[in-house]
Amino acid sequence: MLFLRFFLCLFLLGVTPAQAGLFNPVIQKLKNGMTVAVVEHHRAPVVSHMVWYNVGAADEEPGKSGAAHFFEHMMFQGTSAMPGDSFSKRVQAHGGRGNAFTSYDYTAYFQNIAAQHLPMVMAMEADRMVNLSLETDAIKDEQRVILEERLTRYENEPTALLDERMRSALFFNHPYGRTVIGSMAEIDALTPDDLRSFYHSWYAPNNAVLVVTGDVKPETVFALAEETYGKIEIQPLPERKRRSAEAVPATARIMLPHPEVRQPLWRRLYLAPNLKKAGARKAAAIEVLADMLGEGSLSYLYRRLVMEEKIAVSIGASYQSDSALDSYLSLYAVPQDGRSLEELEAAIELELARFVEQGLAEDFLADTKERMVAGLAFLRDDIGSAGRILGRTLVLYGDPAPAEEWEGHIRGVTKADILEAFNTVFTDKAMVTGLLLPEGDAP
Amino acid sequence: MKRFLSLLICLLPLWACEEQKAELVVPPMPEAAKELAVSVQEVTSPGGVKAWLIEGHEAPVVALSFSFKGGQAYDPSGQNGLSSLTMSLLDEGAGDRDALNLRAYLENRAIGVSFDAERDHLAGKMHLLSSQKEAAFSILGEMLTKPRFDAEAIERMRAQFLAYLKRQEGDPQTEAIHAFFKQVFGDHPYGRPVPGTAEDMRALGKNDFKNLIRSRFAKENLQIAVCGDVTADELGQLLDKAFAALPESPDLPNLPDVIPQFDGKMHKIEAQFPQSVAVFGAEALPRLHDDFYSQYVMNYLLGGGSFSSRLMQELRQKNGLTYGISTMLVLLDKASLLMGTVASAQEKMPEALDRLTAEWQKMGEAGVSSEERASAVTYLTGAYPLRFASSAKTAAFMLAMQQYNLPPDYINDRNNYFRAVTKESIDQMARKILDPDKLTVTVVGNP
């Protein structure tokens, strides 16, 4: 009876009792709608403090690509209380390291720092959630930096230029069809008002998730969250236009010759459902399928095309179910010296056609699933994992279950599930093929 | 809450009024501050294999980092890439298990193994669940002493490297680094590109790989670090499984001493990219030099310290010339460098290089401020615990300590060395190293 009462008390406090999940977070929601998750990790007296906002490049207005990422940069350029670049300086001055990143569906800001400085970084993040200065001069200065970043990541990287074209073809007239960094012209055209409007629309506690991992007690984190983030008022959010975007299935082929490319590359994207559309079971099946096809040297395509046929030097496949909108399964391959990209492509298509008959064996499936879940303990050993994985899960779904229960879903995938996943993805109706070539070479 | 600048209704004259500046309110931390406390155990196995161990039983995970002295710089002339190719083959078949069997064995037990060839060392890492300790260390022993070097695996790994080298040929960042090392080290092995040269790698065969293992994998030139869910006694048994069968002494060729040459000039390589990439640097002091810590702080303030460094502030924050500029200390056995990179749009690179040179000279002549010294020391000492945030990071740190011939106590003394650095010693380092006549640059682009 005492045991039952203890559990009841935990539920009343909003604390989740320990289960056999991935990270076993303790989660609470503040009155202003902000979700706070805590994962204990006592290897070193440090914490990872990570705030995720449910807004990204996919929420940008048409013609204003790059706004979300540009804005992320401006989060480091000052509030009234922390002017200029004093945010970064203050984190560094306390022995912390931090950064941020922008994606299509979310933007995240994190610091790794000694546990005793957790209140400071919480106060600082809460401050810039609502008090950013966004001065015109600072914005103009940072614009130059972002144009340089664009050159580094795209114009100087032929592979990235190919990806950009492929993405725009797969997701034509769709929020995912642009790059997160934006085009040179649109970055250049963004105005201070664009960024201010973006900020005031999307940066609110009810649009944010906090994950703290480290040498700290959950009740400490919740109390500190009340005193910092908890003081910010809930804010109405704009209508989420991106939610209804659907990719229109079509097939495209992109060839990109480049003067500085010496090594040809082949890539392909197949449109695939995200977790919400597929459901947990099917999404897990697509993940296992991608692994069976192209994860590591035990995968089907690697064994057949690299080791046996010797037509590829390397080959791989991947799929990410955590996407607010349509996702994709991607393949890449590098041809052996002397083999053309066309030959390589024909060989890949032949093997894909053979996979169901010849590659989909019960023991191969069982082994693949075991391998996928075998290393989960390593995620718990690294202080950064929970922030990344749980943060993404909570910001996309408002629920830790997809991450916490991932292992069970993977284990439950059957041969029939794989067959169904295969037929869903490899339809040839919604795919883009990309070839990166030395200039002057035939594919 | 949205804050608005408020105008105080002052009783005093306007010139005595101040606009209210928002203040950041930081709540107190209810938990006591905890100090990092790690203790290194020096373990010697029954078979005489030595390792450093930091036990940690919070997670059922063990991380191992080890290296043999004798890396890519020791590859014979005409065989640049022997180390890389050999190390890449160690997990492609061992004992009775061919590549696929070995891969299945490792992956089914979630044993993560990787091998690498650095200029001075041949390195390996292993990441495992403590429930797989016995299996992991045993299979590691097989990989080190009974690699199969099957023809299929050799051709596959060779093809992978050749494709990688071909891809890197067109990459401006890689070109700039290769050109810099060639410029600075000339015909010394350090001047050769890592991981290797395509022509040389085409000619390598099974006997070459076997010779490398035979001559460079030995107990005397081996250093090992372990962190995680294992006790000293357990570790002793495990070390023997992996390493006891190795010969006592290596047969390393001689790696000549070298004095790196910094001609203070700019060397340009044409390439058709919209953004130019430059690599720059000068000679630095070695790891065990008395003034190393002052040098380290100096480098941190110049370009090692992310956003707060002089170079980032000047080139990125104030002038928008680059997305990133940074410097680092490259500490090789035979030479030490202070090296950096910067990428900037073609038309802006001349200005970027001018400002870089100006900052280099300025710190060399005028040194740093007390505030800069204080903030650097606070960061470097405060961030130290982050090095121990996972078993793998901890093991890697302990291995680096051994490679630099630092004692086990260093792990707890380390912050005191940094606290002892004075502004004067930093200034002295700047004068010595940041000589504008020595600043050598390679630029790839269309300058």
Image (tube, rainbow, N blue to C red):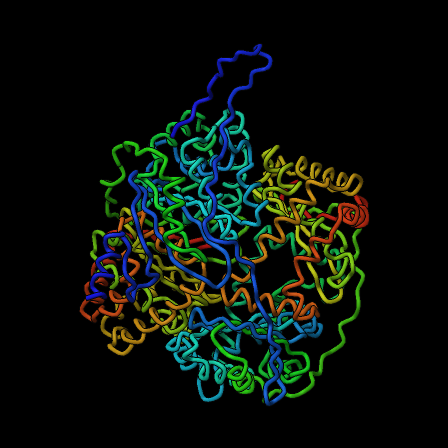
Q: Residue at 51% x, 79% y: name it.
A: B231
Describe residue B315's horizontal placement relative to residue A41 as left or right. Answer: right
Instruction: Give how far across and how far down residue A216 sits, in percent.
Output: 43, 55
Q: Residue at 55% x, 32% y: name it.
A: A84
Q: Can residue A67 be seen in this view?
A: yes
Instruction: Give how far across and how far down residue B123 sits, in percent.
Output: 59, 72
* Relative height, residue B83 to residue A388 (above, below): below
* Relative height, residue B414 to residue A137 (above, below): below
Instruction: Give how far across and how far down residue A427 sits, in percent.
Output: 22, 57
* Relative height, residue B444 to residue A143 (above, below): below
Q: In which quarter of the image is the N terminus of chain A?
A: bottom left
Label tally: 0
Q: Residue at 30% x, 58% y: name it.
A: A403
Splitting the image into 4 quarters, where does residue A383 fall?
Answer: bottom left
Q: In which quarter of the image is the C terminus of chain A?
A: bottom left
> A275 and B241: which one is in front?
B241
Q: Is residue B124 visible?
A: no
Instruction: Give how far across and how far down residue A404 sits, in percent.
Output: 29, 60
Name the outermost residue toward the front: A2
* Relative height, residue B422 to residue B250 (above, below): above
Q: Residue at 73% x, 67% y: name it.
A: B333
> B46 and A77: which one is in front?
B46
> B177 and A231: which one is in front?
A231
Name the outermost residue toward the top: B13
